[in-house]
Amino acid sequence: MHQQPPHSAISRPPIVVLCGSTTYWDQLADAALHETVAGRIVLAPGCNMRQPHPLWSDLKRADRLKAKLDDLHLRKIDLADEVLVVNPDGYIGDSTRREIDYAHSLGKPVRYTHPV
């Protein structure tokens, strides 16, 4: 009897990773909503270090955490099929620019929420 491959081997929705400044946290959440409703698996920043929290209240700890999260986001780009840059008013900061460059180096398509 022929066995069916697992569902993920047959097909899976595209994976999109959101990149952009956490200054625009609400816009990132809105983009995640729209991408999810469009049937995509969404990877996004997992925390907003611009909001106070005990995990990053100490400056040295915050610097280490920021570096760790920056690297984690690059791994999300590795997993994604495409990148969506959330860039209200065309804004792209240094971290986001680095992520875009990384995505391009991997040949990942990059879309933008606003004209660049």
Image (cartoon, rainbow, N blue to C red):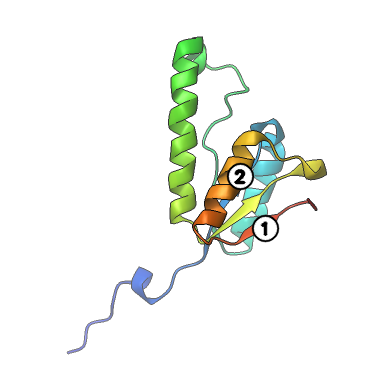
Instruction: Locate residue 91 relative to residue 11 in the image: left or right.
Output: right
Q: Position of residue 73 (x, y in %)?
A: 49, 41
Amino acid carrying label 2: it is Cys
Q: Which class describes the residues within 10 Å of circle 1: few (<14), some (14-19), or many (20+)?
A: some
Percent from the top left, x then y, of residue 113? 74, 52
Furthest toward the bottom, the residue is 1
Q: Considering the numbered disc 1 on the image, is that residue within a helix, a strand or a loop?
A: strand
Q: Which residue is most to the left?
A: 1
Q: Residue at x 47, y 32 (%)?
A: 69
Mark identifier at residue 111: 1
- Amino acid at pointer 1: Arg
Taking the spot 27% from the left edge, 81% from the top edge, the residue there is: 4
Mark 2 Cα within 10 Å, few/some/many (few <14, many 20+)? Answer: many
Question: Which one is earlier in the sequence, the residue at label 2 or at label 1?
Answer: 2
Can residue 42 be seen in this snapshot? no
Q: Residue at (62%, 40%) from the top-left corner?
A: 96
Q: Quadrant of residue 11?
A: bottom left
User: Number of numbered discs present?
Assistant: 2
